[in-house]
Amino acid sequence: MQQDELIAQLQSGNQKAFERIYQLYSKSIYGIIYNIVRDEKVSEEILQDVFLKIWNNASSYDHDKGRFFTWILNIARNASIDKRRSRDFNDNRLNLKSDHFVDILEARSNISGKMDAIGLQKYIDILGPVCKKLIDLLFFKGFTQKESAEELQIPLGTVKTKNRICIDKLRANVLR
Amino acid sequence: MDIKKYISSGILELYVYGALSESESAEVSRILKKYPEVRAEVEEIEEALITLSGAAAPKNPEFLLQSIKEKLSKRIVTIPVETKRTNWSAYLGWAASIVFLFGLFLLFDENQDLKESLQALQLDKVQLETAITEARNDTEKTRELLNAFRDRNVIKVPLPGQEIAPQAYAAAYWDKDENITYIDGKDLPEPPRGMVYQVWSLKINPLVPSSIGLLNEFERDENKVFKLENPNVSEGFGITLEPAGGSETPTLERLYALGTVNS
């Protein structure tokens, strides 16, 4: 498989493979980081650190344990959350739970050009409030099922199935 | 194994999020290798999520790649190797003994270094343990405050700033049952050197103040919440600035915050 091949090349220190990985994932990872720290400059610094970590620690990724995307997602979320908790960043910022990736999409669809706005609007429209919150916690913020259930005050057993429905909706609109 | 059912259980989404335990994840990885339809499903979920989070990025970060690559190349170090043919055998004995002596010295030196770094590490460990204990204590304290503030029997008395400091503000949280009053002094100005805030429980008619305590070490208290014993039947609370150690009666010229209990 192509993906496996690419990762194997990355692990053997191939810079071209690294560039390709960057093209595939950097925008998504930037979105994850920005959603947590909400500061463009700081997010860019973290993004650079995250990709340096990917390069330096590539050999520690093990595909028997999980997806490559999940591995870098974890690195990015941890780095962002560490930054948010750090002293020099702390004051006067909103609580991590109170802001939400949909705010970013909504804010941007208000200011950016029409074409872009339509593209973003579709994510906002198709997902109901519970789905937005659920995806935000589980995917963007890395909450566990239990933490998400507590946060949303829904039974633990419904998190998995409810989330499946949300992602189905997303897929129906995003991928075609 | 019922693959359709497995896919629709929602476990694959959690797998991509990284929300499964290590063993659950390993199990999914195994199944994914065996069933191409599971793999295809995971790839689609991943693609949708990559697109969604990409939409939350302020812009395409392509412009950062160059600077990241420059940092990568610093890792690569090249050492030119020169080889020369010489008749080494004559010198070999001497060289070997010198190397041996040098090696002994190095070992000794390294041993010293290791001992030193072991000591340093042990010191670090003690410091970390202290930090953890402190953090736990802080959490404990915060939880206690939170519980106190949530208790329905606790009366909140806002204490707006007075003439001398109209910007100041404090609040008293009075737990009648426990005879405790918490003072939140976050918005009081820092007291000048040698002075201290003193809190008074007030009877209004006629006005009788009784001291319930000082806000000691105000500057150094991180959350500026103080716990004071208050056995009085208070009708109001006042905070004045007094010389270190406090006063018998309040200095009304330096009355910073004042409020009455609504009942």
Image (cartoon, rainbow, N blue to C red):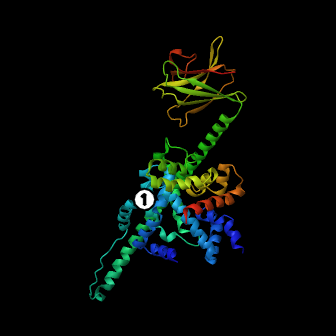
Q: In the rendered image, is residue B123 in sight?
A: no
**What residue lies at 47% left-to-right and 62% top-to-bottom?**
B115
Looking at the picture, tell me which residue is in the foreground, B224 or B123.
B224
Q: Circle 1 is placed at which residue position? A: B60
Q: Is residue A143 above or below residue A54?
A: above
Q: How many marks?
A: 1
Q: Position of residue A108 (x, y in %)?
A: 47, 50
Looking at the picture, tell me which residue is in the foreground, B194 or A49.
A49
Q: Position of residue B92 (x, y in %)?
A: 32, 85
Q: Position of residue A24 (x, y in %)?
A: 46, 66
Left or right of B60? Residue B251 is right
Q: In the rendered image, is residue B28 in sight?
A: yes
The chain to which mark 1 is attached is B
- Check the picture and name the quadrant holding the N terminus of chain B: bottom right
**What residue lies at 47% left-to-right and 73% top-to-bottom?**
A11
Q: Is residue B204 above or below residue A121?
A: above
Q: Quadrant of residue A165?
A: bottom right
Left or right of A52? Residue B148 is right
Q: Three-letter amino acid code at disc 1?
A: Asn
Secondary element at tag 1:
loop
Q: Position of residue A142 (x, y in %)?
A: 58, 57
- Check the picture and name the quadrant holding the C terminus of chain B: top right
Q: Quadrant of residue B225?
A: top right
Q: Is residue A119 above or below residue B41?
A: above
Within-10-Å neighbours for mark 1: few <14, some 14–19, many 20+: some
Looking at the picture, tell me which residue is in the foreground, A112 or B19.
A112
